[in-house]
Image (cartoon, grey):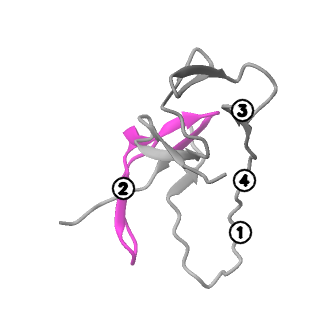
């Protein structure tokens, strides 16, 4: 089965954190459940132990690890991790490849840690 690649947008992180193999007409989370519409039918997910089954098709889960297999090559990472008890503000971040920012209002707290995406500063 070809992957239609559904992208999700997060208002909290102001970015596109996830993609999925299934293709719903509409999707949303509400009251600890995940709901989708597909071909006019409403589906409520996360109601039993079966995971990754959408519209009668069982999908596989995968995790892609990032390893430093070529330490001399430059890598491009889009997120940054740090340990703190509050979000911080980085108005500008410069490298030889570009510039960006991580403003404190972009951070979201998940399980006691703070996360954000690096936003590129576009020069027009």
Within the image, what quadrant is residue 124 found in? bottom left
Q: CA distance from mark 4 to mark 1?
A: 13 Å
Residue farthest toward the top in the current orientation of the protein: 31
Of 26 and 7, nearer the camera is 26
In space, the residues marked 1 and 3 are separated at their CA atoms by 35 Å
Magenta-drawn stretch contains 37: no
Q: Residues within 10 Å of mark 1 (few under 14, many from 20)?
A: few
- The residue that mark 2 highlights is 101
The residue singled out by tag 1 in the image is 67
Residue 25 relative to residue 45: left or right:
left
What label does residue 118 carry, if any? none
Mark 2 and mark 4: Cα distance apart in space: 28 Å
* Disc number for residue 56: 3
Q: Give the residue at the far right of this rendering.
A: 49
**Residue furthest to the front:** 39
Q: Find the magenta span and give its range.
A: 87-115
**What x and y, as percent, mark residue 92?**
33, 59
Query: Mark 2 falls on what kind of element?
Result: strand
Q: Which residue is mark 4?
A: 63
Q: Secondary structure at mark 1?
A: loop
């Amino acid at each position: 089965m070809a992957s239609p690649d559904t992208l999700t947008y997060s208002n909290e992180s102001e970015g596109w954190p996830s993609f999925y193999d299934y293709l719903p007409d509409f999707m949303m989370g509400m009251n600890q459940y995940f709901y989708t519409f597909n071909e006019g039918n409403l589906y409520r997910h996360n109601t039993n132990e079966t995971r990754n089954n959408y519209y009668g098709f069982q999908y596989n889960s995968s995790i892609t690890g990032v390893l430093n297999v070529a330490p001399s090559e430059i890598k491009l990472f889009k997120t940054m991790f740090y340990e703190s008890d509050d979000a911080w503000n980085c108005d500008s971040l410069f490298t030889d490849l570009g510039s960006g920012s991580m403003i404190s209002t972009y951070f979201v707290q998940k399980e006691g840690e703070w996360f954000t995406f690096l936003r590129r500063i576009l020069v027009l």
